[in-house]
Amino acid sequence: MNEQLLTDCTLCPRDCHVNRIKGQRGYCRESSELVVARAALHMWEEPCISGEKGSGTVFFSGCAMGCVYCQNHNIAIGAAGKEITVNRLSEIFLELQAKEANNINLVTPSHYVPQIVDAIIQAKEKGLHIPIVYNCSSYEKVETLKLLDGLIDIYLPDFKYMEDEIAIKYSNAKDYANYAKDAIAEMVRQTGEAQFNDDGIMTKGVIVRHLTLPEYLEDSKKIIHYLYKTFGDTIYISIMNQFTPLDTVKNYPEINRKITDEEYEELVDYAIELGVENGFIQEGETATDSFIPEFNEEGV
């Protein structure tokens, strides 16, 4: 592992400059010790990621974003999870492959990139052959993403906000959109156009997710417009309606509700009018706790 990257940590845009090797913790709340809250088959990703067998998701504790509405709040603040070694992480990858997972899905992995690189290399030497998914917020540095070049097959980033004011209010993430634009461009450079196997499961490519927030439909439209006009059919766009107002947003009354069917339909119609064809939408009642797994150290 390249320990130098953790002795003066600038892996993400927070640039905390803490020595995580010595146990110091920055914005992500994690030292250099790998902490994983769950490693199991997950059925609730996009159809080409989960399929019928499931995505082999590994939920890492800690997060560099800290969104006030986070559905995984408990692990984002580092309140759940088990410390493991890089060797154990590589074993987990192989165990998920043995369970016939369609892929290895690294959830909120950004602050552990050096350790993850080592774990992937170890696992590949021992027979790991299914695609690796990097599931992130897009609040990423291009320099960090380049460490993953050739190791990640599928990028599954969010594009949360276009306007800086909104990014600061809900995620304290100044310049979020600029980082997201550069990060997604690097992801597309690494993977190229999407590829699928005979079962319709993605084997390479980029799916950009956008979670529609209440009251911010115009910002959502700006994001969809940017993504399609910039990347066209090279990427897939996943428009999500599963925003779930948890207790953490009680002080933000404007988003303390689910989005309406009308709001969501207007955004989907907008995407269709733009010409978006490579995309995913959600239907029915999705804003429920069913999308939030138990972080009980299963599989860790």
Image (cartoon, helix red, strand yellow):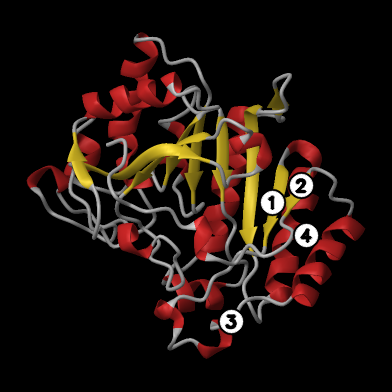
* Mark 2 residue crowding within 10 angstroms, few (<14) / some (14–19) / many (20+): some
Find out whether the residues at labels 1 and 2 contact each other: C-beta distance under 8 Å: yes
Find out whether the residues at labels 3 and 2 contact each other: C-beta distance under 8 Å: no
Q: Secondary structure at mark 1?
A: strand
Rendered image quadrant of residue 63 = bottom left
Earlier along the polypeptide chain: callout 3 or callout 2? 3
Work out how far the residue at label 1 is from the one at label 4, CA to CA, in angstroms. 13 Å
Left or right of 58 on screen, residue 21: left
Residue at image mark 2: 279
Where in the figure is residue 292, as x and y percent of width and height?
Answer: 46, 57
Work out how far the residue at label 4 is from the one at label 2, CA to CA, in angstroms. 13 Å
Work out how far the residue at label 3 is from the one at label 1, CA to CA, in angstroms. 21 Å
- Disc 3 marks which amino acid? Arg
Rendered image quadrant of residue 73 = bottom left
* Mark 1 residue crowding within 10 angstroms, few (<14) / some (14–19) / many (20+): many
Residue drawn 56% across the image and 38% down it: 155
Where in the figure is residue 107, as x and y percent of width and height?
Answer: 43, 45
Q: Secondary structure at mark 4?
A: helix
Q: Is residue 1 visible?
A: no
Residue at image mark 1: 238
Work out how far the residue at label 1 is from the one at label 2, CA to CA, in angstroms. 5 Å
Work out how far the residue at label 4 is from the one at label 3, CA to CA, in angstroms. 25 Å
Between disc 4 and disc 3, the foreground one is: 3
- Disc 2 marks which amino acid? Gly
Disc assigned to residue 257:
3
Residue at image mark 4: 225
Q: Is residue 71 visible?
A: yes
- Disc 4 marks which amino acid? His
Residue drawn 57% across the image and 43% down it: 156
